[in-house]
Amino acid sequence: MSRLPAGMYLPGASCLHRLDPLVKLVGFVIFIAAVIVTDSVWGYALLAVFIGGLIVLSGIPLNTIFGPVRRTYLFFLTIFFMNGFFFSAADPLWSRWFFCLSWAGMIQGANVVLRLIILIIAGGILTATTSPMEITAALRRLLKPLGYVGIPVDILSLIISVAIQFIPVLFEEVETIRKAQTARGARFDSARLRERAESMFPLVIPVFLAAFRRADELALAMEARGYRCGKKRSEVAKNSLHLWDIGALFIVLGVLMVQIFVF
Amino acid sequence: MPIVLENVSFTYGTGTPFETVALREIDLRIADGEFVGVMGHTGCGKSTLIQLMAGLLTPAHGKVMIDGADINGKGYPLANLRQRLSIIFQYPECQIFETTMEKDVAFGLKHSGLSAPEIQAKVCRALESVGFSFEEIRSLSPLELSGGEKRRVAIAGALVTEPQILILDEPVAGIDPVGRGDFLKLVSGLNRNGVTVLMVSHNTDVLGDYAERILVLDQGRLIMDGPTRSVFSDVEKLEKLRLGVCRPRKIAHLLKERGVQFPQDIVSYEDLLKAVIKSRKSVAVS
Ligand SMILES: Nc1ncnc2c1ncn2[C@@H]1O[C@H](COP(=O)(O)OP(=O)(O)OP(=O)(O)O)[C@@H](O)[C@H]1O
Ligand SMILES: [Mg+2]
């Protein structure tokens, strides 16, 4: 892997890293709501200032944050032009056939693109400052009330956390097998679609087999260490909200309120 | 097909917080028919080095040249190189994906342009060279084989193209002693027939027995490169690097430390035996 996959955890000690993961998760959800209700220039300015503050606080390098956005710029351009050209407005600037360029369409396009970019960056900050383990622990705390209505929250969160931890392992597996098959002459980067499609079998089949094998091994190891389905388990760390956790939540809530009532 | 590396450096994750320099300024030339061992601590860059030679990674700086041509140059026929250079990774059995062993071994010949009977003849030869009977194994599925058997099939899959260069990354880890012996015999047989062999291994005994030249990597740098005898002659240095030397060499070294007159140019068990027999004879004569 010569480049960092999007959404990777970057260990650190910034105040965003130390913020309670539950707060970050809930804050992220509130922030999504704030982004969705935003549609004025001042609203975006506020979001930009907020995100800028988060980036500074997190201490994550800028190219790590903007990398995913930069790499998918074509996607954003497409969305922008699709909106710009296909929006049926009453006063088009230019129209022919079924294309119809309008100010309203372009504004709509800019809105969608800006929201997506802000959400991707915010998501990136969340996953860069919160380890997968913390995210699943936070999910478990968040879902806990569901346990009272008979939903097996423990098992659900175990499944989620195992799945999340398997992702990098699978990436590595894919990389190893891709190299091994390339060395045997597989053509993953062939210009011919047929060759490329055919070359998926030598990659996908071994990766699946390896995933099943690992799942078996993990199940065995968990049982050997005394894991039993449905038993109550102890938490490693007790979490309680600190003052600054609550403060952070209020700040995000404030952003949402301002977006709704002021702009 | 000599392999030449000129000032090669490689970095993983360039521009990310996980940037790791895996190789620094490697200069190297491997002639046809050599048997080269590569050793060094875990994480020192051995796998990176051989993957660069196989064209699986592209160097950040410097050139990798095989047969005089830069393999990362524009328009270089990498597909052609893959027919002449094979690489066997650790746990090669993971790469098996076809429904029958015959088809899986034939995978490497898919783009060779050979006719079906020619391909079958080569597959048969490859499977027999790793000790299978072609008729018995050809239609078995991978689910019907043990791990060790699958590994032999995977090795056959790498040998089926009859490569001129064979690269092995930790090939003997996790094989039983008999299988290891058979495998090493196969590899040294190929080497005697002119195949260049490059073998990464932590097992100094195997390197002492088979390699004629040793490369030692340390933190991405090539710190030693020479004939096995001369690399292993510096026991103190290798022990300071916590790599050690092969046991026959170590025994000779310990004898010297005890003040016993004993030849020090020993790397293989064969050398050790010869030296012991010779010294016994000279004792008998005097
Ligand atoms: N895919 C990768 N992404 C990032 N860093 C890597 C990757 N592969 C290897 N590295 C790093 O590059 C360095 C050299 O790794 P390499 O695999 O070449 O070592 P090695 O000598 O083969 O080790 P081993 O004896 O454990 O197989 C190590 O520090 C390793 O952490
Ligand atoms: Mg390695």
Image (spheres, helix red, strand yellow):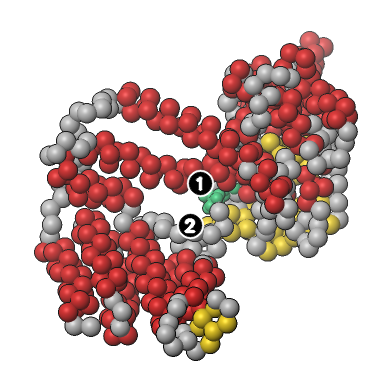
Query: How far apart are the alpha carbons under marks 1 and 2?
Result: 10 Å
Count of numbered labels shown in the rendering? 2
Q: Chain of mark 1?
A: A
Q: Position of residue B37 (x, y in %)?
A: 71, 38
For disc 2, the marked residue is A5
Tell me whether circle 1 and circle 2 mark residues in contact (CB < 8 Å): yes
Q: Write the residue at 34% across / 72% down.
A: A55
Image quarter of residue B186? top right
Q: Can you give x and y, in whole percent of width and height, for residue A42 in the image?
A: 28, 85
Depth check: B73 or B174 in front? B73
Residue positioned 59% across, 42% down in the render: A176
- Is B119 placed above or below A248 here? above
Determine whether the beta carbon of the residue marked 1 sits less than 8 angstroms from the nearest atom of ligand 1: no
- Residue A229 placed where, x, y %? 26, 27
Q: Which residue is mark 1?
A: A171
A3 versus B252 height, above or below: below
Q: Is residue A69 visible?
A: yes
Asked whether, in this view, residue A142 is left or right of residue B110, the answer is left
- Do discs 1 and 2 belong to a common subunit? yes
